[in-house]
Amino acid sequence: MMIFKKAIPRRTFLRGLGASVALPMLDAMIPALANTNAVKMPLRVGYTYSPNGIIEEAFRPTGAGANYEMSHVVKQWAHVRDKVLVLSNLNNGDSESVSGHIGGSSMFLTGSKPSKSLSEIYAGISVDQVIAKQFGKETPLESLQLCIENAAELAGQSAGGYSSAYTNTISWSSPTSPMPMIHRPRDVFERLFGDAGTNPEARKVRLKEQKSILDFVMEDFSRTKKKLGARDQAKLDEFTTVLRDVEVRIQKAEKTIDMELPDMQRPVGIPEYEEHSRLMYDLLHMAFQTDMTRVFTFMVAREYSELVFTNLGHTDPYHPITHHRGNPTKIRMASEINTFHARLFGEFLAKLEATKDLDGTSILDNAMLVYGAGMGNGDIHSQWNIPVALIGGGRGTLNSGRHILYEEGTPFSNLHVAMLNKMSIETESFGGELGISNGELDLDRSA
């Protein structure tokens, strides 16, 4: 490893007209004679949310402890099994305590019962935003909130006397402030690399000419690259290749995803869903890699989602399928959707595992990623025994590779308390009515 006498700043950007590209972690960012192992790698935190519940048989492993048998869903993460903690018997509030879908999403990260109103919304601050307020002091963006479905098109889809705000996001900056979720890959890309805030006209020129962001920073790229050692140069080349690839894919996706179509011509199915999801995961990967943010939430669909997974051979919308009433065909179809979502997340995990930090550990080693749903049984809207997994090494604080069975009725918010304390954000309790924690979840149990 080549380490220069004078390290380049950790927060280094390649700059050009209307563009600003953060560099990934490079050896040259550590001062000469510094002990790389003594330099703390950043901890990254993410919450990926699956709506409408997850079929229990598809998610719940057989057995407990380290030798548990992986289910169809969890098997999608077999390549990082030693970093997976499957947590059972955690309740996201009381069964039928709110209104299944509403309570599932709104209480998932807040632990607070939402107010039943179409206009005066009230939940609680979500755990991701508690973390973001601390971690965001060291990054350009405090957090990212992503989704696949356009909430603006669904704004009128309130239900049961509750505002659609409760189902269009899982992130709340305050009890009355739901965080909007971004569904366009281009918008995420521009937030990370566009520098549009300082020069919006340059952004318009770049988009109109369909030029890559790298074209606008190439002069600075060449100048910076000359200062780097061979390993850093290779790392920078690899990163910029991925960056250009993602940008090209976004341009292609925009031609189909963002086409202005009359309502009658808008496709019912979602053949582009898979690429859309991969783009979002790739953008999150680069956000972590460049340390633009250390916190994200991602909804792979919203509660009540009517998406049709034509890529799986389905013709029925997602939400009605989950109300299967024991119908084996619907159970199979819902399980296929659940497994498909888990596979895409598994690809994301593989990229985090393959991306190394300066000390030789991976981004996944230095992450805490929660994957789960707000309902344990979407068919009957139960918020008991929700499917949830905690994945990553937690920067050495997590001993994973197990399935843990907790006492029935353990509050899901206990996990929030445990994670916050492992991040040195001292917490005794989290959540409000129905979801309030009663202690810290023991993540070191053997089973």
Image: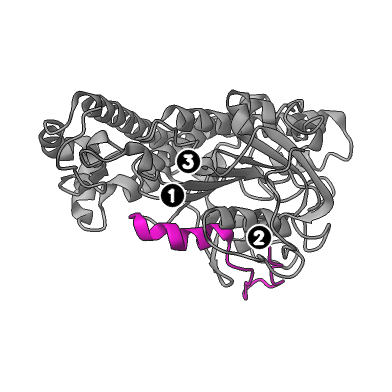
Answer above or below: position of 363 versus 312: below
Magenta stretch holds residue 122: yes
For mark 1, what is the residue?
Answer: 294
The amino acid sitting under disc 1 is Arg
User: The disc labelled 2 sits on which kind of residue?
Assistant: Ser
Question: The residue tagged with tag 1: helix, strand or loop?
Answer: loop
Residue at 78% in and 46% down? 376
Residue 128 as seen in the image, left or right of residue 417: left
Which label number is shown at residue 106? Answer: 2
Image coordinates for residue 120, horizontal then vertical, percent: 62, 76
Image spot of residue 117 (x, y percent): 68, 73
- Residue 327 appears in which quarter of the rendering? top right
The earlier-in-sequence mark between 2 and 1 is 2
CA gap between label 2 and label 3 equals 28 Å
Camera sees residue 179: no
Image quarter where the N terminus lies is top left
Magenta stretch prevailing secondary structure? loop
Colour pattern: one colour
- Residue 366 circle label: 3
Residue 86 place in picture, x, y as percent: 70, 38
Q: Give the magenta range.
A: 111-140
10 Å neighbourhood of mark 3: few (<14), some, or many (≥20)?
many
* N-term mark: 2 or 3: 2
Q: CA distance from mark 2 to mark 1?
A: 22 Å
